[in-house]
Amino acid sequence: MSEIKLDDVLQKIDGYKEAWCGLIPNSEFDWFVERVKTAIEIYYSIADPAKLSAELRRIEKASRQPSSEFLDLVKNASDTTQKVLEKHGGLLVMPKAGDNNAIADLALEIRSRIILASDWKTEKTKRRRKVKVMRTLPFKRPTRQRVDVLVSLVAAACGGATGKAASRSWSDDNKQVIQVVLADIFDALEIDDDISDSEALRRHVAIRNSLDQKS
């Protein structure tokens, strides 16, 4: 599954922010929302190697028999994948749907940019072609660290807006401001099924406390 587009996430945040009105002081509300959006933008700037590799492999596989499906994969690729596709060769020219010759040319162009090596591998009685695709990243950090950065920035925004350090409530009936906001952000990012906002906050508090003890 491709990562949801940044613009779509920010649009969702505009819908969710109304629920934060009673949690954040009115005088700080607009500032807080902008800080949350900036945190999400920074989260997107930190690439996830596993997701990038999987997305490039899907595009490479579809490019072997280029069709409208291949064209859709390229058009809807994540921002990081788009940067990788355009790193060697510049901007891609998107053909019109149904222009099979132009789509085939695009497939050849993309394959020339992302395939590092190709060879045949024997598997029992069959031989399969194995393709190695490029995985050049502007940042190399695993998913958990991306989330840690996001939570830290949102916690700072909450602290700046409310004057209180982020903390975790043990009761679902009395959640802290940051827990409510993180739950909405994780939902907007569509990562709430994979990553618990409570666990992410617990990790943030633990890291903050350990830093306080060292200082």
Image: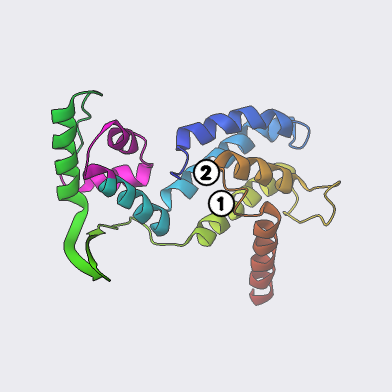
Q: Secondary structure at mark 2?
A: helix
Q: Amino acid at mark 1?
A: Leu
Q: Residue at x 69, y 75 (%)?
A: 213
10 Å crowding of disc 1: few (<14), some (14-19), many (20+): many
Calculate the distance from the C-alpha at mark 2 to the C-alpha at mark 1: 7 Å
Residue wearing tag 1: 150
Q: Residue at x 85, y 53 (%)?
A: 171
| Residue 197 visible to an observer of this rendering | yes
Is 177 drawn above or below residue 129 in the view shown? above
Q: Residue at x 55, y 55 (%)?
A: 147
Q: Amino acid at mark 2?
A: Ile
Most frequent secondary structure within the magenta stretch: helix
Residue wearing tag 2: 40
10 Å crowding of disc 2: few (<14), some (14-19), many (20+): many
Q: Secondary structure at mark 1?
A: helix
Magenta segment boundaries in residue numbering: 62-89
Given contact means CB atoms under 8 Å apart, are the residues at marks 2 and 1 in contact? yes
Q: Is residue 138 left or right of residue 214?
A: left
